[in-house]
Every structure is written in structure tokens, then in C-alpha cells.
């Protein structure tokens, strides 16, 4: 029996929903600069699979790592945590 791998999950905001069944999710974190000790915001974007096209720009979503679905898509939307007002 093969043990199931624990998948990474990330919380982020949807910044683009123009593609079919795909959203671009931006995740940001604060990191301290090693020399100047000032906090810097680091951002990273991920393309995630949204099979029902439910996500809209501004939604807060939880994405989960998955097998490669296309050349750049390696994540899928697990759930919408908060919809944009």
C-alpha cells in the first residue's frame, strides 16, 4: 500500500479570472531584510484549476498542490474562504 503524500496548501487572493477554468492566485508574506531589518512584502503568483469557474477577482481562496494539469498549472482551488463584497 502506498502512503498518501501530504499536499501543500496556500491561502491567497484571486487577481485574474479571465482564463477558462483557471484563476491566478497571489500569495504574499512579510520577510525581514537581512541587512536593514526592514519588513518587505514578498509576493508570488500561482495558476490554479477552478473547475466550475466560481472564483471572481478579489476572492480569498485556499489552493492545494496537485499533479501537473498543464504547463504552468500545478494547483487547484480547494475552497473559497471569503467572497469579495
Image: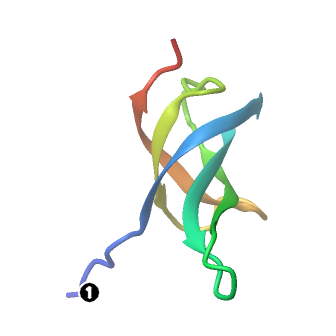
Q: Position of residue 62 (x, y in %)?
A: 43, 46
Q: Position of residue 60 (x, y in %)?
A: 49, 35
Q: Residue at x 68, y 40 (%)?
A: 22
Q: Quadrant of residue 4?
A: bottom left
35, above or below 63, in the image: below
Q: Quadrant of residue 15?
A: top right
The chosen color scheme is rainbow
Q: Is residue 41 left or right of residue 63?
A: right
Position of the N terminus by quadrant = bottom left
Q: Which residue of the protein is positioned furthest toward the left in this rendering?
A: 1
Q: Residue at x 33, y 79 (%)?
A: 5
Q: Quadrant of residue 13?
A: top right
Q: Residue at x 54, y 23 (%)?
A: 54
Question: Mark 1 sits on what residue?
Answer: 2
Q: Residue at x 57, y 71 (%)?
A: 31
6, above or below 34, in the image: above
Query: Which one is nearer the viewer's eye here, 65 or 51?
Result: 65
- Kind of element beneath mark 1: loop
Amino acid at each position: 500500500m502506498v502512503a498518501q503524500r501530504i499536499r501543500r496548501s496556500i491561502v491567497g487572493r484571486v487577481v485574474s479570472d479571465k482564463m477558462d477554468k483557471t484563476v491566478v492566485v497571489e500569495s504574499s508574506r512579510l520577510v525581514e531584510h537581512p541587512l536593514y531589518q526592514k519588513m518587505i512584502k514578498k509576493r508570488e503568483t500561482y495558476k490554479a484549476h477552478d473547475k466550475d469557474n466560481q472564483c471572481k477577482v478579489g476572492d480569498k481562496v485556499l489552493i492545494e498542490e496537485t499533479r501537473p494539469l498543464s504547463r504552468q498549472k500545478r494547483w487547484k482551488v480547494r475552497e473559497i474562504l471569503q467572497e469579495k463584497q
